[in-house]
Amino acid sequence: MKYNLGLNVNLFNKFSETSRFKIGRLTGGGVILSYKCTNRCRHCLVSGSPGRENVWMSEPLMDEVFGAISELGPDCEVHIGGGEPLLNPDCLVAAVNSAIKHRINISYVETNGFWGRNPGKFVPILKSLYKAGLRSFLISVSPFHAEFITPETTGAAIKHVREVFGYGGAFVWVPEFLEMLGRHDATKPLKFSELSPEMLRYIPDTYYLVPGGRVGFNDPPLYVLRPAREFFMTDCVRELMGTAHFHIDLYENYMPGGLCAGIAPCSFRELAEGVSLDSRPVLKALLNGGIKSLFDYATAFGFVENEKGYAGKCHLCVELRKFINEKSPCPELAPAEFYSFLAK
């Protein structure tokens, strides 16, 4: 039987209850400059979209964010992304400069490569980023992105990055999909409806999908859907307390290292001291009772389980939080646009 990502049974709080959110040293993460994107991908964890707010992290805030990261995780590796950061090259260059100023090790900048067919505009920007100290781009390659960006455009973006940064400067994610996309017309976007059932089954493990964000809303489903009760033995302590893949966004939100988008335990400014859970009922439920506790909390407001089931505990969590955000908003359910753009 194939189980979904995140079915950990963690007994951390089996015999005690925590009343405070307080993490340890930051070890690795990302900075989200904006949620604005050229795409509305089916797998997006943060609900990026062309329709999202055209708001970007300010330079003063960048300095605060990277300064805090350097204090809370001196050896922390950080990537910079969105959204699509190259929609605002000036903001991206400023972010790289700020990170370098604070002696942050930048692992890469994420891009979907939408700009690949426009080298006249973007190659000079790549050169500016290299001059500033950036040494790697992560270029997204997958059927999710190919719905919006032709394989030809993606291939051109990879080529331009390698011309400026060297061959190793293009971190292609996921490389296995290059061959698959090569079987299709490179000049046209790839419709998800054209993928075979075998390919749909291949995607989740190859992309290492977390079934949060939009993944659970995909039709056809990318996972076997299961009843909510199958996830009741699991908790979320590891995801919420981990610091290996945290994110800090342009609204000052700290996103936990388990890639739990749409839940912000605190501002990055509060990380050093931690925060009380008294005013954060969703976070309190997840830390002390896991998915079952959050399910019970949402049920008290009228939540009704989806008879079709859920793609994983993260999908169930997103559905529960979306419902709670509509019925009784909590401060930790942020940013609010995450929930309104899940289905659009």
Image (cartoon, rainbow, N blue to C red):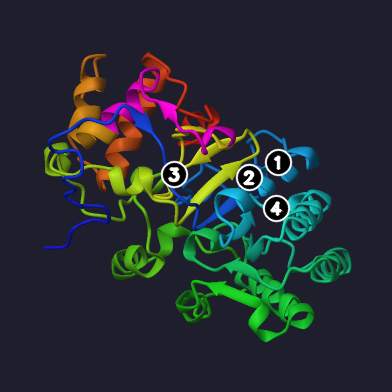
Q: In this rendering, which labeled residue sits more in front, label 3 or label 4?
A: 3
For the residues labelled 3 and 1, the Cα–Cα distance comes to: 19 Å
Give the structural element (helix, strand or loop) at label 1.
Answer: helix
Tag 4: amino acid: Pro
Amino acid type at circle 3 is Pro
Residue located farthest toward the bottom when viewing the structure as drawn: 167
Measuring from the top left, give residue 179's x and y in whole percent: 49, 82
Q: Name the residue under label 1.
A: 64
Which label's residue is closer to the chain start, 3 or 2?
Answer: 2
Q: Which of the marked residues, 3 or 1, is nearer the chain's N terminus?
A: 1
Residue 253 in the magenta stretch? The answer is no
In the rendered image, residue 276 lying in the magenta stretch gets the answer: yes
* Callouts 1 and 2 close, C-beta under 8 Å: yes
The answer to whether any part of residue 219 appears in the image is no
Q: How far apart are marks 3 and 2 (CA)?
A: 16 Å
Residue that label 3 marks: 256
Crowd rating for badge 2 (residues with CA inside 10 Å; few <14, some 14–19, many 20+): some
User: Disc 4 on helix, strand or loop?
Assistant: helix
Q: Mark 4 points at which residue?
A: 85
Compared with residue 81, is residue 279 higher up or lower down, i.e. above or below? Answer: above
Q: In this view, does 83 lie to the left or right of 59?
A: left
Q: How crowded is mark 3: few (under 14 residues within 10 Å), some or many (20 or more)?
A: many
Q: Where is residue 244 in the image (x, y as percent from the top left)?
A: 44, 57
Q: In which quarter of the image is the N terminus?
A: bottom left
Magenta-highlighted residues: 269-286
Q: Which of marks 4 and 1 is nearer the N terminus?
A: 1
Between 142 and 210, the one lying in front of the other is: 210
**Nearer-the-camera pick, 343 or 76:** 76
Q: Where is residue 17 in the image (x, y as percent from the top left)?
A: 22, 30
Sequence-wise, the earlier of marks 3 and 4 is 4
Q: Please, what is the three-letter code of the amino acid marked with disc 2?
A: Ala
